[in-house]
Image (tube, rainbow, N blue to C red):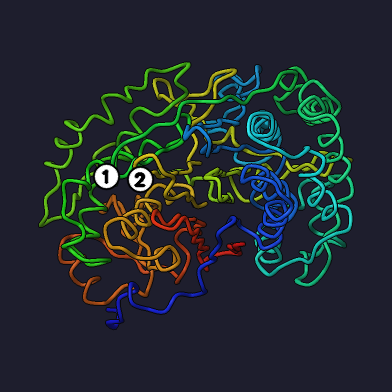
C-alpha cells in the first residue's frame, strides 16, 4: 500500500499562477498561449486571442488537433452577459451506413484509415466565433500559426514521444510518414517540424474564410482524396458549412451557474454529477479524503449510465435533458448512493471501447469579461493517421465513435453527428463571469472537470493548486482479470495512502497509475471583488498559462 503523504491541498503549487488585470490565456502549448497573449496586448479581445491560440495548436499539436478535426466552445459576451455555445463537430458522410460496414465484415467501425473520417468542423467553428465575437481580421489572427507552419517550430519531448509511440500508424500513409517520420525515423526533440503545405492551406482560410474549406479548394482536395483511397467522405459532404451556435446547458451548484456544451457533447454528464453531489457536504468531508472521493465516484457512475443510455444526436434520437437535469431526479439518484459501499454491479452496459483521448484545450479571458472556453480534437492520437497529400492536413477518425449495433442512441446514420467526449465549462457568480476551464482526456474529462470545480468551489483551492491536486478516474475494467470488477478506480500515487486504504475498504478496486496522467487542465478564475484574473495549467502535458 502507498505511504501516507501530505494532502495535495497544502503542497506547493507546481508553478505560479498566471495573474493579470488585462487578460489571461491558458493553452495546451506555450506557443499557443504566447500567440493569444500577444493578441490581447495588441488590443484584441478574448475571442481574438482564443482564435489565434486555437490556430497555433493545429500546427504545434498535430497529434491532438488539426483543421481536419472538430471544435466545441463556450463564449461569454462581456457586454451582454450572454453565454453562447458553438458546436463545430461534423456529421457522418452521406455514404456512411451501418450496412456498408456490415457488408465488409465489420462489427465496429475501423479505428484508423480513410473509412473512419467524418466531415471536419473546426474551420467552421473558427468562422462562427470570428463573425460574431472577434474584433481583428482573420488573416491577422491566423498569422502566428501560418508562420510556425511555414518556418517550423522546435519538436518538444511529448511530440517526439507520440511519433515514436504511434510510428506504425504514421507509416501507413506516405504523406503522414513524410511529415512525422522523416527518413523513416520518429521526430527528434529539438528538430524543427516544418509544414509548408499546411501553411498554404491556412493562408487560403485566412484569405477566404470558410469558403476556402467548405465548397472550396480545401474541401475538394480532402473529399476527392478520401474517395480515391476507398473511404466514404466525398467533396459533396464538404460543400456546406457544418457548425452552429447552440444554447448552452446550465445548472446551479452552490450558488454558481455552471454552463456546459450541449449535445452531441457529453457536457450534461458533468452537470448531472454536480447536481447529485450538491446534496452532500463535500467541504466537511475534506479535500481528496476517502468519503469525498467515494461520493463523487458513485455520482459519476450514475451520470455515465445516462450517457450510455441516452446520448446521441438530438436531431435523430430523443434526449430527455430536462428530465435528466431536474433537481428531483438528482435527489433520486443521490438516494441510490450507499455511503458505506461502492456499487459493484454496473448501473448500465459499459462501453468497453477505448475513447479518444488526444484532444487539446484552451481558454482566454479579458478585462471586459469576454471569455472563450475552447476544446478541439482529431479524436484518437493522430486521428485517422491519414494526411491528405499536398495539404498537410491530418484527418480525424471521429466516425469510429459511432456504434453499429441496432437500437443504440449513437448508432451510425448518414448525416448524423456522433456523441463527443469533448466538453468545456464556464461558471458565473450572479451576473459576473467567474471561471472557465476544461481538459483533454476522453471519459476522464467530465470526471476531472468535476474534481476541479469541487476543489475550487467546495474546498477553496486556488486555481493552480486545484489543477495540480491528485486526480482519480473511475473506469470500466477491460482486462480478463476485470470480469468480476466492472469498475476500477485509478488513482495517482500522490493520494494519501490512508485514503487509498479507506477507499479499498469501501469496495473500490484500486489501480495506481503514473503520476500526473489523469487530466491536463487549463483554467482561469476571475476574482469577483477585484476583477483580477488568475490562470493555471496542469503539469500533466505541455500547457502554459500567461497573464498581462
Snapshot quadrant of residue 346: top left
Snapshot quadrant of residue 431: top left
Query: In the image, residue 135 lies at what x, y percent?
Result: 70, 38
Query: In the image, residue 462 lies at what x, y percent?
Result: 39, 65
Q: Residue at x 37, y 68 (%)?
A: 470
Q: Please name the residue that numbered disc 1 is placed on.
A: 255
Which labelled disc corresponds to residue 134? Answer: none
Snapshot quadrant of residue 413: top right
The quadrant of the image that shows the N terminus is: bottom left
- Badge 1 density bin: few <14, some 14–19, many ≥20, Cα 10 Å: few
Q: Residue at x 18, y 49 (%)?
A: 343
User: Seen in the image, is 417 located left or right of residue 34?
Assistant: left
Label located before the other in sequence (2 or 1): 1
Q: Looking at the image, which is closer to me, 291 or 427?
A: 427
Helix, strand or loop at mark 1? loop
Mark 2 and mark 1 residues within 8 Å of each other at the beta carbon: yes
- Badge 2 density bin: few <14, some 14–19, many ≥20, Cα 10 Å: some
Q: Looking at the image, which is closer to me, 137 or 317?
A: 137
User: Seen in the image, is 195 located left or right of residue 141?
Assistant: right
Query: In the image, residue 527 lies at what x, y percent?
Result: 42, 57
Which labelled disc corresponds to residue 429? Answer: 2
Amino acid at each position: 500500500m502507498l505511504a501516507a503523504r501530505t494532502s495535495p491541498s497544502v503542497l506547493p503549487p507546481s508553478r505560479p499562477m498566471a495573474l493579470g488585470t488585462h487578460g489571461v490565456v491558458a493553452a495546451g502549448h506555450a506557443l499557443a498561449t504566447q500567440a493569444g497573449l500577444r493578441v490581447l496586448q495588441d488590443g484584441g479581445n478574448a475571442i481574438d486571442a482564443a482564435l489565434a491560440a486555437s490556430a497555433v495548436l493545429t500546427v504545434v499539436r498535430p497529434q491532438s488537433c488539426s483543421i481536419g478535426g472538430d471544435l466545441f466552445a463556450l463564449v461569454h459576451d462581456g457586454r451582454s452577459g450572454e453565454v453562447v455555445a458553438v458546436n463545430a463537430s461534423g456529421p457522418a458522410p452521406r455514404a456512411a451506413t451501418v450496412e456498408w460496414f456490415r457488408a465488409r465484415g465489420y462489427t465496429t467501425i475501423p479505428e484508423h484509415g480513410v473509412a473512419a473520417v467524418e466531415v471536419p468542423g473546426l474551420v467552421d467553428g473558427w468562422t462562427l466565433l470570428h463573425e460574431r465575437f472577434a474584433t481583428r481580421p482573420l488573416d491577422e489572427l491566423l498569422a502566428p500559426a501560418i508562420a510556425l507552419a511555414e518556418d517550423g517550430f522546435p519538436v518538444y519531448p511529448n511530440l517526439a514521444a507520440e511519433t515514436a509511440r504511434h510510428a506504425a500508424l504514421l507509416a501507413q500513409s506516405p504523406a503522414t510518414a513524410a511529415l512525422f517520420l522523416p527518413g523513416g525515423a520518429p521526430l527528434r526533440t529539438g528538430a524543427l517540424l516544418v509544414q509548408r503545405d499546411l501553411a498554404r492551406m491556412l493562408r487560403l482560410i485566412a484569405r477566404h474564410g470558410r469558403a476556402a474549406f467548405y465548397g472550396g479548394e480545401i474541401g475538394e482536395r480532402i473529399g476527392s482524396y478520401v474517395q480515391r483511397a476507398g473511404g466514404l467522405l466525398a467533396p459533396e459532404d464538404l460543400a456546406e458549412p457544418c457548425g452552429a451556435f447552440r444554447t448552452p446547458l446550465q445548472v446551479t451548484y452552490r450558488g454558481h451557474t455552471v454552463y456546459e456544451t450541449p449535445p452531441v457533447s457529453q457536457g450534461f454528464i458533468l452537470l448531472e454529477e454536480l447536481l447529485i453531489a450538491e446534496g452532500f457536504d463535500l467541504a466537511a468531508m475534506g479535500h481528496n479524503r476517502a468519503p469525498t472521493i467515494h461520493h463523487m465516484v458513485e455520482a459519476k457512475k450514475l451520470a455515465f449510465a445516462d450517457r450510455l443510455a441516452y446520448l446521441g444526436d438530438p436531431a435523430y434520437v430523443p434526449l430527455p435533458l430536462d428530465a435528466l437535469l431536474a433537481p428531483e431526479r438528482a435527489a433520486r439518484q443521490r438516494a441510490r448512493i450507499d455511503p458505506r459501499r461502492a456499487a459493484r454491479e454496473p448501473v448500465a452496459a459499459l462501453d468497453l471501447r477505448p475513447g479518444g483521448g488526444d484532444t487539446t484545450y484552451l481558454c482566454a479571458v479579458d478585462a471586459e469579461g469576454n471569455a472563450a472556453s475552447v476544446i478541439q480534437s482529431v479524436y484518437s492520437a493522430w486521428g485517422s493517421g491519414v494526411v491528405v497529400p499536398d495539404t498537410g492536413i491530418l484527418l480525424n477518425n471521429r466516425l469510429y465513435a459511432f456504434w453499429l449495433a441496432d437500437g443504440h442512441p449513437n448508432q451510425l446514420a448518414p448525416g448524423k453527428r456522433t456523441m463527443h467526449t469533448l466538453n468545456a465549462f464556464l461558471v458565473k457568480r450572479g451576473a459576473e463571469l467567474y471561471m472557465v476551464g476544461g481538459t483533454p482526456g476522453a471519459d476522464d474529462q467530465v470526471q476531472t472537470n468535476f474534481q476541479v470545480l469541487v476543489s475550487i468551489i467546495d474546498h477553496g483551492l486556488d486555481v493552480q493548486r486545484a489543477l495540480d491536486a491528485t486526480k482519480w478516474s473511475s473506469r470500466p475494467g477491460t482486462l480478463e482479470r476485470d470480469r468480476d470488477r466492472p469498475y476500477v478506480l485509478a488513482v495517482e500515487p500522490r493520494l494519501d495512502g490512508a485514503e487509498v486504504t479507506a477507499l479499498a475498504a469501501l469496495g473500490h478496486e484500486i489501480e495506481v497509475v503514473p503520476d500526473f496522467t489523469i487530466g491536463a487542465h487549463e483554467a482561469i478564475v476571475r476574482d469577483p471583488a477585484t476583477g483580477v484574473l488568475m490562470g493555471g495549467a496542469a503539469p500533466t502535458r505541455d500547457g502554459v498559462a500567461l497573464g498581462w
